Image (cartoon, coloured by chain):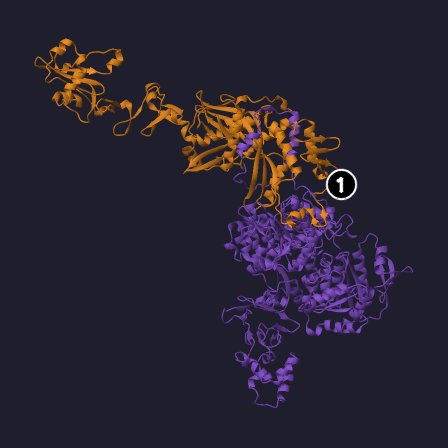
Amino acid sequence: MPNISYIGKEYESAFNSICELYRNGYISQGILEQVNLSEKEITYRDTVFALRPYEEQNNDLSAVMTEKGASWFEKIRNMEKVDSGASDWLALIADVAEDYHKHNSFLEFCQKDHTIEKETINRQITDINAFLQKFYPHLDDTQIVVGKGENATVDIYAVNFLMDINNGVGEFQKVLGKVYFKYMNRKYFLLRKEEGNEIEQQIRAVIETNDFENAETGSDITRNSTVINEVLAELDRVIRQGQFTEAVVFAGEKDLRIIEHYLSNGPQISVTLDCLHLRVYAIHHIRWTNTVYQVERHQVPLLYFLANSANQLTVSCARCREEEDGILMVDNRIEYEKDGIRKSVFLDFSRKDLGIDEEQVFEIQQMSDFSKHLLPVRCSDVGMREHNIDCVRYICERDGFEYNGKRYCRDCTHPKIVFRDHTGEAKLTATMGYASDLNSFAEYSDLRKCRICGRSFFHEFESAVPECALCGKIRNGTVGQGENVYAEYRDLFSLAKRIFVHRAGTVAIEDGEVVIFRIKSFGRTHYYIYDKLSMLKKGYLDGPKKLQFFGGD
Amino acid sequence: MKTEKKYMIEFEPDAFDRHNDATRISSKIKNYSKDIHSMNILADELDRFDDFDSLRIPVDQYEHKNGIYGIVRTAEHRSGVIYAHQAQAALAFIRDLRGFGILADVVGSGKTYEAGVVISELAVRNKIRSILFVVPSQALSDWVTVIEQRFGMGVGSLYQAGERLDRSQIQIETYGNYRVPRRPIIVTDDDFVKWGEDCTDLLFDVIVVDEAHHLCAEEGKYSYAMKILSKLVALKRKAKRSYCLLLSATPHSGNLEKMFRLWYFVRCTGGNPSDFDEKEDRFRTAYYIKEKEYYRNYVCKGASTVMEFIETVKNEEVLNSVNKDRFDQYLSENDQLLEFYDLPRGKKNEIISGFLYENDDICDQVYKNVARAYHNRVLRSIMIRQPNANLIAKKKNVVNLLFYRTPNPYKHEIMISDENRKLLLNIDQYNTESAICYDGEQFSVDSYIRDFAGNRRYQDVASELFRKTIVSIDNIDEANANPLFWKKGSLHYYAVQMKNSPIEVKNRLYVMDSRNDDSFEHKFAALEGLLERHRDQRMIVFFDYDLKRKERVVEKFVERIRQSKFCDRFLEGCVQKKTEVERVFNEKEDALLVVTEPSFTESVNLQTSNIIVNFQVIADPVAMDQRIGRIFRLGQKNDVIIYNLADMDRLEGYSLMYLSRIGLLTSNSGDATILAGSNSEKMIAIRCNRCGKVELISESDYEAREKKQQLFCNTPDCMQRGEVLGKISVTDFKCDKCGTSMIRSDEVEGYECVSTPGFGNSKGILQNNAQQFDRNYHCRKQCTMLNCSKLREQKCRVVEALKYNFNASTSELMVICAKCPDKNFCDRKCKPETGINGCLDCGYATCDPKPHKLTFNENWEAKCPVCGRTERGIMRPIVASSFASYIKSSWDFNQDKGVSFCPNLLKEAEKVAEIKKILDMDNLSEDD
């Protein structure tokens, strides 16, 4: 026999909500035992909750004054353990809500028609110019093109949750909230509450006009389960990194009132709210189209600007936008690290100085991703040859290199390569040659050509008889194990030659590139050089060449 | 969001479980649709369901049905044993304050019941494992009865802890890191302080503190109690069990600055315990200092008292809003535009008040805004405080019996006119049903006003009749000040105060012969009439206990009443027999309790009576409020009647009209406390040392004027001489080291001695030579002789005589000494006529410290007789800042031939009446 629990007028609204959800088939079977809509009775577990006017409520045994005292003080009176579990009524409400959300937790919304007024465009262009002026004052001949370039559509995810919060004391209150993420470049970006609120406003506008039938399910349904895990992980990160407060968007007026109440009745300096539980109950997705602007110079795109609904700008490098560091600013916020501390600067375009001082501008230019993109290159090498003007380009860090404090383009038509020589010093290869003894490059001024093998070798000083170390050895006869080397390579010579070789004094020496032979034959000495790499060039073995310098056949 | 305040949401370590939540999200994506939209709204409703949004226990469940539990329903409980306002307060407390804050409904609203409902609601939601009640000792038994029986916690369930918390009695259980006493505990605030910080390891889910305004004290035991409480709350915060009810009907007594500690505690969730230590602010945390700065500058608008607050907001409203143009126009019309902004604050206030007086529409709006600022933004920002009109409180009816001295006491009938009606007034029957004869019919004054007032207010007509009666009795030329009163402008004063008094105040005129200076007989006769009228009712009679001996009438009254036919009803109210007196008084239905000691006016519950008689009216608003508080308190079942008997040509007459006018006698007790404090808290009474002129100004004004050196006396003579007004400060003294006080008593015309008597119980008296500015105070020879061990041993006849009559005069003692047969019996220095010099360091003196002479320097400072030698303590003057000091000194000032007294008092009354007006407008919402 189930217990009967009477629900009064104060709980009528919740009671009716359950009935309405049930009537529309939004409560799964098994959650409620029975619902009698006409009698206004809900059977849940062992209790029948009956909505009745107060006069019709019979004795509700849960709260009565008995001969032993008040029933609500019974456990205190008897010093029994107090059960912290919620009452059946609260459990019913929680179960129904959870069940509903479980089946309606991943929802697709649509954006309101993305039309933008000319005035807004002008304003956003003004903001872009202010941005360029602030961070790229040297950038000339630029042009801002509206609606060109970057794909203006981004994925927005709203994580919906229920929080139990208080201001440190008193009973916790339930507050519904959301945190928005933008998915770009395979990364999630947390949206600050300003933009979150703008999106929220627009979604509400769509809802109010009943214009949400246009929503199309997410473009990549196969990613759904991944998205859930990714988005929740992002939320977890946001909570752990203390960014939650600046991103939370409260769901309704009631939630805002609760927060407002805490703030207006809390300490003046700063109010700390405690969250006991946060339970995510839904994720909403929306494909969001922004207004896009391309900044180009001589038809070369440099930067892309996405202006969101809150007129906040997201800036990415035109060339590196797919790269991890290609996004320079997200929704007016620039982040960088200084002395190991993460810093965040918010640009306020309503202010002439954008709300930042010169020191911050300097720090952003030097320490943020700004330092890796749109780096100016002015080179006279090309220009002098062609139109007698300097070549000016803006390149990303990965597209250039620095030599002697000057930046060069990697894709320059006059290629220059920086090379660190044996001393470790960086030098341009244009001024260097290959030193065979070092198996490395060296300044031309330090290279000498071996009079025997003809190869360049490193020698700082001029010499009348330049010889590389290898050739020097073989000429001086200081070749240990030379016979063995000769034996190893003798097959390169013809049989006839080999027969007449005098074994004594015939030696060979080698390094990675060449083998040099000293052949004694008929009392004469001949020098041969064999280029090991020639095999690669021709695809078959070529014989050793006689070095004419020493004479011989 | 309206508030641009910084905030941060912090998460408990396990607040978010993403893995678990991931299982609750379906990977099947759905399009948002109309159906889902409407269902989402319903689901959101369930998500937001707040269990604290309504009361779970139907209020009729508290009613007594059988057994001993529950609240017994009486005729008063028409709609249930819990009144609607009590249920509303309890609901607001749990719904809006979430169980942490102040319940501050006015006295008589039944806050204990409100607390009972709150606790019951928490209990029914399983929120209470442990509970602590901290209550005043006099309310302990009430609390036990209410919680155990009326709210049914169970008889004996509360453990009444003493000054040491016996842990074996409270069944401590451990939950995680917390020790939770399972037995509910109740303790008096005195004992709670003695627990010290030993109890701060205990976790109480709910703490209830009654009379929480005491916690505002910056020093002493209550300051310490606040620290302990703050520590307990810190533990509760950690354990997430932070319910705390602070109860107070009077969160402040006119001094807003003092309320800061409560503010800090509530707004900062218990505050930082170390901030409640006794120390200077600069040693407290930056958090405390910033909050205080905000409280002072923004919440209280820089004002430290209610009076200052009202003035500040009023001025702001006039100067910084849409009213500015009209005000500037007003200034230019009065040629004050240029000079106004350079005027001192007090002058500015006067001009602004004049402007508001002339512009009713603006005045009304300005007062509403001031009231909103005070009630909604100051008080209700930290407490649940319902409008007075919503509460059940008994009414106070005040009847002033004014005794008018006239050389024409035998004029029985006079003719006066009222709106072209010729009335024949029968003086002898003035207070009866046949006071007025008009058109052949007889009326009482009240019934005449009722029938003929037309559109006129009751008070206007009554005041006019009163004025015309006196004018006709003595044929006074109205153009001139009434020569029959000591102070000029008195008739106007009485008429204006009557006109502006609340409707509950009724004035009765008694005529007496000015040739017979003693008003006692007239008053006694009137009292006999009252005793006759209330023959079956309990009555309490109070006197002025601070008068000089010759002016005291209490003894004479007792003697007369013993001889009268009402002697059977007589009961003497003295502290020694307090409990017994209370018992007898409550048993005897027609008891006449004559309070003979001033201390009997505190901490006595006499609400079984509803009538008090102030046989003499005192000028101290706080003391008057306390007298009324004996009967106007919780448990009073009837409307209260307060009879005040005052001689119109004495200070008591003026004081009575002042107190009536400001509404102190008629308003509820909470407001009365604020009104009483309005001209005492943070006020300074200053006086010209030359002419004696007195002013009452706020501390801040005093400081500003002192800084600008504008504290000159403006009486013509003094102005020429450049006399400066100084604080009235030569009556009471206090040691800056040991705190020993010397409080002047007019009754003994001196100071009670600070020594511990070595013999007998009689306290000695420190006196000077009775000249006004004599700065030498010394013990009396009588006292030193009584405390001399040598004289006692030798059975000195003088000492023997003193044992019987401590107040025997020196000449009487000298006669006894002269008759002593043993001439060599004592030294010459011991004789009554030789003064006390020989006793100052005499080895035979048994009192501690030894007999002493205090010589005050030009700053009225002297070495403390108790700790002066060891601690180098200095007795310094206690600044007399209260209204009582002001009015007494002002009354004594007669240099101006009594011209300024009445106008000044009228002005003072207007200021305080303004506060009353604001206090009454407590039901305005921000949108009204």
Residue B790 lies, in percent from the top left, at: 56, 83
At label 1, the amino acid type is Asn
Q: Secondary structure at mark 1?
A: loop
Looking at the image, the residue that sits furthest to the front is: A1
Chain letter of the purple region: B
Above or below, comparing residue B40 to residue B503 in the picture: above
> Looking at the picture, does residue B458 appear above or below residue A490?
below
Front residue of B771/A18: it is A18
Residue that lies at the very extreme toward the top in this rendered image: A496
Q: Chain of mark 1?
A: A
Residue B441 percent across, percent down from the top left: 91, 60
Would residue A300 appear left or right of A204 to someone viewing this image?
left
Percent across and percent down for residue A128 are 49, 28
Q: Residue A407 appears in which quarter of the rendering?
A: top left
Residue B403: x percent and y percent?
Answer: 78, 67
Which quadrant of the structure image shows residue B723? bottom right
Q: Which residue is mark 1?
A: A58
Figure chain in orange: A
Q: Residue at x 64, y 58 (%)?
A: B136
Residue B620 vs residue B851, the one in the foreground:
B851
